[in-house]
Image (cartoon, rainbow, N blue to C red):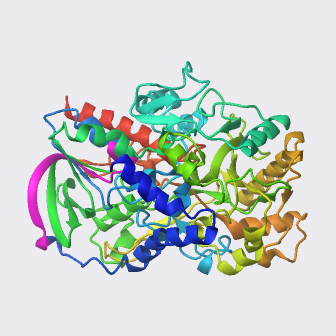
Amino acid sequence: MALAVKFSILTLVFACIGSGDAFFFLLKPLAELGRYYEDHNNLVQPTYTSSSAKKIPEYDFIIVGAGAAGCVLANRLSENARWKVLLLEAGPAENEFNNIPVLTTFVQNSHYNWADVAEPQNGSCWGMVDQRCSIPHGKGLGGSTMINYMIYNRGNPADFDRWAAMGNPGWSYSDVFPYFLKTERASLRGLEDSKYHNYDGMVSVEFPPFRTNLARTFIKGAREVGHKKIDYNGKSQLGVSYVQTNTINGMRQTAYRALIEPILANRPNLHVKANSRVTKVLINPNTKTAYGVTYSTNFRNYDVHASEEVVITAGSINTPQLLMLSGIGPADHLKYIKVPVVQDLPVGQNLVDSVVFNGLTFILNETGHSLLFDSRFQLHSIADYFHGRGPLTIPGGVEAIDFLQTSRSQPNGSPDIAIVFSTGSLVSDGGLGLRSGKRIKKTLYNKVYGPLETLKNDQWTASVVLLHPKSRGYIKLRNANPYNSPKIYTNYLAEEEDVETLLEGIKEAVRISKSPAMKRYDARVLGIPLPNCEQYELTDDNYWRCAIRTLSSTAYQQLGTCRMGPVEDLTTVVSAQLRVHGINNLRVADVSVVPTTISGQSAALSYMIGEKAADLIKETWTQ
């Protein structure tokens, strides 16, 4: 799209920013798209039988899912001109709104999100509609890199050494570090000579070019209470830093734009099909060999065969769903929903999902510092954006992150809490983005946060992330219809220790707010109690325990549903070579294979896993 046309479109959206009502009226259709898609997702597609599928030509490799790992694999495997590679993706291509970092909360309410919703929880999600938390994950060319907060965080070296110690040779930190570097093209001011970064990869990593004074003060305040300023992708992960993001000149860079668009025209052996939903992996039940997939597009089914391998890179929700639909999963469950069992494996078990407490909002005694949709977003902000600067480049308002250890952390240098600093609060987008995306009840929002919409004072939020939850969930099929969403049981906060760890993180965020640097703003915790926690004083730990169970939700970190490990470990689904146990020519290469918790973000992990998987596959088929 020409630059002038892009500018005109964004001008239309932001022209009325000065009057918030007009702005939100213009953005409401974007937010409502996701809700419409969720409501009609199970109705718009007919049910097909495999026998009705049309056969199309054979490929060497079929990759299911165009997220970060899938795009890496498609790029690396198609380097061999003799290999014919097909990349299938259920969703569409991106649009210009995807690319604007500050609109992240709105994009998560669009049709680029699968819009899955967890099953009702007893011990968490009390403040969400029907006590069901949303589970956002991306649907489109780029996968979750189309809708995430773009934060690039690899995790702690100790995380990967634990993987190797669990029976996964080749996955220690020294093993995977080169694969992190291989993808990265860093442009980080002040870190130009760091040995912990690479500067000639294809995926951009940079600091957002715009910073508020409030974010600078948060960094200073964290240092004043004893937290070092660090490169969290460097030698140590304990400390505070501005966020490093997968953006390029302030614009979101999806995996597809980074890894596929630059090569597609010059690689006739690589084919990409969007809006093509894979409904089944084709497996010979006698030889237990995968030989292709069935996918649907434009209301027709197609069978496509792979002579070498099928590689599933659909993520921690869709990958176990597809495997179970194909007969690979817990035998009792598959028999119950009448799916023929091909291989009895614990697919969908061991769901790990870091939770984030979103309810810690601070009110300041000043104005003009936070990212409310007001006078900051004038037409000059749009012009700044196209020149790689200005407030539109801040990813969903997130500017800084502080990694710390609580009294419950392991003595290995790995943090168990991250405090994510956001300029603004739940009301900064008028309730159309974050509140809607997280399914926060309107009654709760109106009582606690609604008054802030008319308050002139600035706000900032400390989102407290539990990096290593003890609680585990699982995923099951709703039925044998591939177009129905799976049942997701997150079991957030089932272990009391998770609540206590988050409570320590909240107290540390409050301590930072009282640092000498932040005292100039006279920051105070929002004093309106949550309706279901009013029996406690705000100074009582029991109030915050109640608040944690009310306003904690996903930190977009679903992992482990196709756990990696030796075949003797009956909790695992794939080997250290990412091969599905007991099935030939079928691999899983996404974050669903992660065997334990991590201190990083799933996007960085996905890029690394894709690179590692590409080498494993090349080693197999070039010998």
At 87% from the left edge and 43% from the top edge, which residue is drawn?
515
At 55% from the left edge and 60% from the top edge, which residue is drawn?
105
Q: Is residue 560 visible?
A: yes
The one nearer the camera, 210 or 181, is: 210
The one nearer the camera, 581 or 170, is: 170
Please check the rendered image and state whether residue 53 is part of the magenta-colored stretch, yes or no: yes
At 48% from the left edge and 74% from the top edge, which residue is drawn?
32
Figure quadrant of residue 444:
bottom right
Q: Is residue 603 shown above or below 77?
A: below
The one nearer the camera, 67 or 242, is: 242
Figure quadrant of residue 525:
bottom right
In the rendered image, the quadrant that contains the C terminus is top left
Q: Is residue 569 left or right of residue 473?
A: left
Q: Is residue 327 shown above or below 236?
A: below
Q: How many marks?
A: 0
Q: Is residue 316 visible?
A: no
Give percent across and percent down for residue 381: 57, 49
The residue furthest top is 193
Please check the rendered image and state whether residue 236 is part of the magenta-colored stretch, yes or no: no
Give percent across and percent down for residue 396: 59, 54
Q: Is residue 131 shown above or below 573?
A: below
Q: Is residue 88 shown above or below 454?
A: above
Q: Is residue 92 left or right of residue 359?
A: left
Give percent across and percent down for residue 391: 60, 47
**Which contiguous range is marked in magenta?**
51-71
Q: Is residue 413 left or right of residue 379?
A: right
